[in-house]
Image (cartoon, coloured by chain):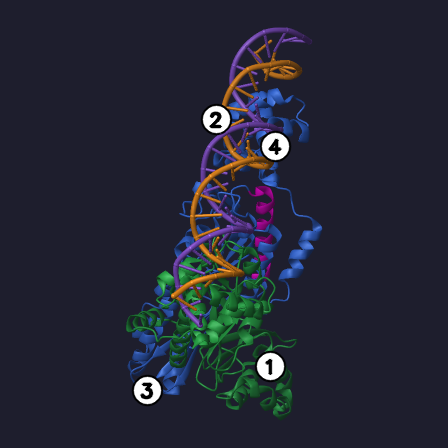
Chain colours: A green, B blue, C purple, D orange
Amino acid sequence: MLEDRRLEVLRAIVEDYVTTHEPVGSKALAERHNLGVSPATIRNDMAALEEEGFIAQPHTSAGRIPTDLGYRLFVDRISDVKPISLGERRAIEQFLSGSVDLDDVMVRTVRLLAQVTRQVALVQYPSLTRSSVRHVELIATSTTRLLLILIADTGRVEQRQIEMSAPVTEQNLSDVRGRLLSDVTGKQFFLLPEILERFTEKCDPEVRAIAAAVVATLLDAATEHVDERIVIGGTAHLARYGEAFPLAIQPVLEALEEQVVLMRLMGEVATSGVTVRIGQETAVEGLESTSVVTTRYGRQGQELASLGVVGPTHMDYPGAMRSVQAVAQYVTRIIEEQ
Amino acid sequence: MLEDRRLEVLRAIVEDYVTTHEPVGSKALAERHNLGVSPATIRNDMAALEEEGFIAQPHTSAGRIPTDLGYRLFVDRISDVKPISLGERRAIEQFLSGSVDLDDVMVRTVRLLAQVTRQVALVQYPSLTRSSVRHVELIATSTTRLLLILIADTGRVEQRQIEMSAPVTEQNLSDVRGRLLSDVTGKQFFLLPEILERFTEKCDPEVRAIAAAVVATLLDAATEHVDERIVIGGTAHLARYGEAFPLAIQPVLEALEEQVVLMRLMGEVATSGVTVRIGQETAVEGLESTSVVTTRYGRQGQELASLGVVGPTHMDYPGAMRSVQAVAQYVTRIIEEQ
DNA sequence: CTTGGCACTCAAGCAATTTGAGTGCTAACG
DNA sequence: CGTTAGCACTCAAATTGCTTGAGTGCCAAG
């Protein structure tokens, strides 16, 4: 009972602080939320919450603001994530429909997410390793130059140049292409190393050089740095929290330009549900005063990649979680159509 | 003679202001640059320069800062662009070499440019219209679904889905593919509408449906929104000019997220040499207090696209022009190897 | 356990004052 | 005529002292 009210007080503090961005005092709380008790009682609760580390005072004569721990508790136990409205569903659907290719889907998604959450949005390209080969194409662009094109069932396309030391005949190329196609089409990318292990040996001696080069390039293209493509959008929203806040934007922008950081943010995500990392939990230098809300997208049990938003720790968590989840659902659907 | 010294004074003011970011006074000028005259004389020159609109005073008791017009004069008549050092050449070369595909080249270039200029960098993908068809591939991913892949000689790849209402046989597809390949390979993209005008008619009646769909999609992919891909990097540098300056970063970030704005910045560029647009000259809302330094890249007379940097009007123009030009040269070289 | 009362703290805002960098003007100089 | 020293003047920015009031913690009464 008493515990319950304390949580209510914390919720009220978080909600108020998120909207006003100013420390909230006991009086303001009593007025704005009908907690049914006087400011003095709220002060007692606040003292307890502060003792437990959920809220803090910037200075003696100020109100309280939630700590990272406070936000954590709020997210875990207090907030309820409402489903998005029909209007929002429609808006998302409309925004994402009519994409011409995967790049287009990614760009639209990141814009959409940035717009609805009013935060910085991140969208990772569908993982190659987790998808299957739709098609492989092998083209001679000159007698000694080949172009290998990989197409995944997500619509993702990778291409690599191959330089051959000896000229290649169309006949030989066609031979390799045919074998390759029948071996790998429809297979999952992560199985390719195994599948192609004996590919070269099984070829006629005269095409072995080609086969070897192609297999090497293909495996390289299918595994190397391949899940690293991430699109960012909405960075302008960072500037909104002008300088008033401990959120200095330079380190944040810097962190978001680091591939390693992005990979960490998008990679370490629970396979189901929405992941929220608050402040220090991001474990990234420069993002100490931001929170990251992410989720995976792609068919259940076979998630392709992650998407999410980055914002100040005093963000609207329920709203962000809601939007991230909804967008992930729609992207999943769109990608499956590709 | 007298005119000469005035220009020297302007140069000194620009150089000092660019490094210190503070209004410069007559005394400081006399000390730091050996102009051979006393502060009083410099004051007279400054009064004249102010009269002509090249410099201004933020307030009565402050030094002078260059106006946009002042920077203009500085860029046009005063600054000399030194060639880059051997070390820098090496660094650029090393940074760009070893790219695996076009996307990689673009990403590396934008990072490089942002790093050396310490500004926001913009790099536009090579224009399709200005390049030629290296290869076209047409693949059935199901009986009624085709995938069209366009490969330009710049290494750029575009792909589109085609939905057919009736099933397509491999035979018919192969027929269309063969005709298409022999018609368009090696041709410049902007000639395609003309070249393919009668393509469908010339086909056998039974493949006309396919031909029509393919031609329509191909022309669409080759012309529609196709030069709009621009990569941005180094936005963190914007935050460096903290809030101290009239350069509020939010409008700048917002502008840089607008496709239309980017196109305008990258599009309206002289075909040769480095273009500098200062302050208002950018003609973009939100970029009034920034300057844009751009140049085209790609073989002379057949430039493929633009690249450049965006920074505060009080930027190091000679340095930026130098770097932009040097990077453009190297990118041209790299792209030709692709 | 709750609440009104009250003394206490301290950031933030305001006004008054000082400081000094930088200017424009004038008169003298070569 | 261009240059320069001298000097009065201006005004942003920094410093200081003061006031205000939001918000607190604690205590005693309900």
- In this view of the protein, which residue sits in the foreground, A103 or B166? A103
- Distance of mark 3 from mark 2, alpha carbons? 74 Å
Position of residue B8 measured from the top left corner of the image (x, y, whole percent): 60, 29
B141 w.r.t. B35: above or below: below
Compare marks 3 and 2 and give the one earlier in the sequence: 2
Q: Which residue is mark 3?
A: B167
Chain identity of mark 4: B
A103 w.r.t. A23: above or below: below
Q: Nearer the viewer, mark 3 or mark 1?
A: 1
A91 w.r.t. B55: above or below: below
- Distance of mark 3 from mark 4, alpha carbons? 73 Å
Question: What's under tag 2, amino acid-wise?
Answer: Glu
Position of residue B244 measured from the top left corner of the image (x, y, whole percent): 53, 44
Q: Which residue is mark 2?
A: B52
Q: Nearer the viewer, mark 3 or mark 4?
A: 4
Q: Nearer the viewer, mark 1 or mark 4?
A: 4
Q: Point out which mark residue B137 bears.
A: none
Q: Which quadrant holds the N terminus of chain A? A: bottom left
Q: Residue at x 41, y 62 (%)?
A: A39
Q: Which residue is mark 1?
A: A219
- In this view of the protein, which residue sits in the foreground, A134 or B12? B12
Position of residue B143 measured from the top left corner of the image (x, y, whole percent): 36, 87
Chain identity of mark 1: A
User: What span is in magenta?
Assistant: B315-336
Q: Secondary structure at mark 1?
A: helix
Q: Which residue is mark 4?
A: B12
Position of residue C2 measured from the top left corner of the image (x, y, whole percent): 41, 68
How many marks the image carries: the answer is: 4
Q: Few, some or many C-alpha atoms within 10 Å of disc 3 (few <14, some 14-19, many ≥20)?
A: few
